[in-house]
Amino acid sequence: MNKSEVIQSFLRKGYLVSPDLLEVDISDNKSFLDMLSSKIVSKDKPLIVSKDLFLAVTNNGVIDINWLEFEKSKVLFEKKSINKMYDTFLNILNPNGEKIKNIKINGISEIKRIEEKKPIERSNALSNVNVLKQFDLPSKKINIKDFVNYFKYRYEALKGILQGRQELSNLHSINRILNKQSGEEVATIGLVYDKQTSKNGNIILTLEDTTGFLKAIVTKSSPEAFKAAGNICLDEVIGIVGKTNERFLFATSVIFPDIMNNKQKKCSEDVCAAFISDIHVGSKMFLEKEFIKFIDWLNGNSSDEKIKYIGPRVKYLFLIGDLVDGIGVYPGQENSLLLKNIKHQYNRLAELLSLINKDIKLIICPGNHDSIRAAEPQPQLDKDYAEALWNLPNVIMVSNPALVNIHSNGEFEGYNILMYHGASFHYYVNNVSSLRENKPRDNPSHILKFLLQKRHLAPSHSSTTYVPIGNEDPLVIDKVPDIIVSGDMHRSDTAVYNGVIIINCSCWQSKTDFQEKTGNNPDFCKVPLFSLKEKKVFLVNFAE
């Protein structure tokens, strides 16, 4: 059996072959594979069969190895890229230099080998990423005081924004309003403690500040205020203008912190940023063929004349959570998994991302399917589970949410990009009637616009699971971003609101039974691209 036949037989059994194994005479290849299978006592199957492993098996040793650690040590090959190993296999398999289009690894999926083409010249602009804000695990035990400080920080931060609004110039604390005579026009800022509808259809708000509580009544006689009050959420911070009446305030205006018109920026370099989310590697429904097509395009190897010159302009790729499908995220998930080990899922993603040109910065935040706590803010991906991703030289790990600045230099201040996966979205879809009218599951940009008006990513206490960290609320949008980007809804949607570009990413997973039950209508493999020079967003579709 020649070398090519040896390697092919191992690949069919789900193993890769370390080049040093070819130094050993394996004339009876079938017997060795049978012996190997009978002696492995650990559940995880190795990816690489080496000379050392061969000697251990044939010397009647019982194999019980940490296969992930074993794989890493062999893949590195003295800190060389994993791609070098694949190239070695390809060279052995193809002594005559013939092209291999597809090669199966572990019987799981395909790594496509592209026909050699003259690559399109890439942009020589230097990428630059600065993480302006991200969050880590709390370093102490959480108690009630931390939750009090969490809401106090939210109130003070958003109060500071609202105080600059001209409509709230006659500002008073709640305690002072309660002591005023009836009929005086006043303004106040408070956190919404309660919201009810009276028998005659008026909206009754209970506001709270650091001095006390106040009931504000919004009637249909003030139509603009009444319409705005319909969109008020519990626990958000708002401004109210109205007239006093004993211990009530009859509201005439409702003021949200909101985003004012954002200033325009202009970058002189022809550079793009791409945005993807919800890749769900490890799922049987992961669209790997389309994802590799996207990677080919990033590397300048697309055959599509209309778009092939755009890929080499991409210097930044944002990955907005749900990188893998995870384990035990929802009941019965194991039936839809191709890879049932979370480390294997991340290893596979790392394999794919390692194919991307290293001059493209990969900025990665987690989502609710990833191997990290579900409570927000979610810290960076766990190094134990996602070590293969951490080892990629062009990866920048951030928390969820995070604020990142890209492409700043001496002449340009760069663009600020707010990353948030979007765990809170479903709460507002289900609880805000004005959002439901716009079919937010199919048009998620309406949700992001709604949250920008609140200046908070999850203003209601029950809209997401969270952990208070320090004396701050990490979900407050205190700094206005140039772009806000999210995922989770598996729908591609873009918009502009008061100068802020809104991007929601599509997914790389076909529709699951779980999504069928929840009413999600995903679209697939659409990549929003942001031109830093033109300050415009356009979509590239990689769906087959």
Image: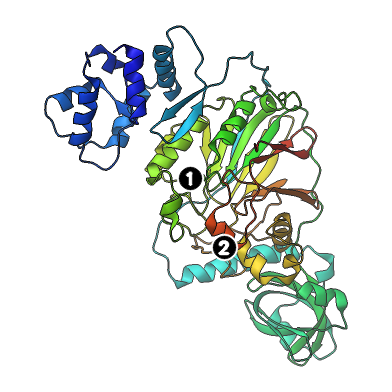
The correct choice, above or below, for 461 with respect to 529 in the image is: below
Q: Quadrant of the C terminus?
A: top right
Residue holding disc 2: 517
Residue reaching furthest to the top: 96
Q: Is residue 373 left or right of residue 396?
A: left
* Residue at x-position 43% and y-position 69%: 143
* Residue at x-position 77% and y-position 93%: 246
Find residue 298 and report its horizontal and vertical position in percent. Answer: 63, 28
- Is residue 458 visible in the rendered image? The answer is no
Q: Is residue 269 left or right of residue 278?
A: right
Find residue 112 and report its horizontal and vertical position in percent. Answer: 52, 26
Q: Which numbered disc, 2 or 1, marks the residue that appears first in the sequence?
A: 1
- Is residue 12 visible in the rendered image? The answer is yes
Spatial CA span between label 2 and label 1: 18 Å
Q: For numbered disc 2, what is the local secondary structure? A: helix
Residue holding disc 1: 284
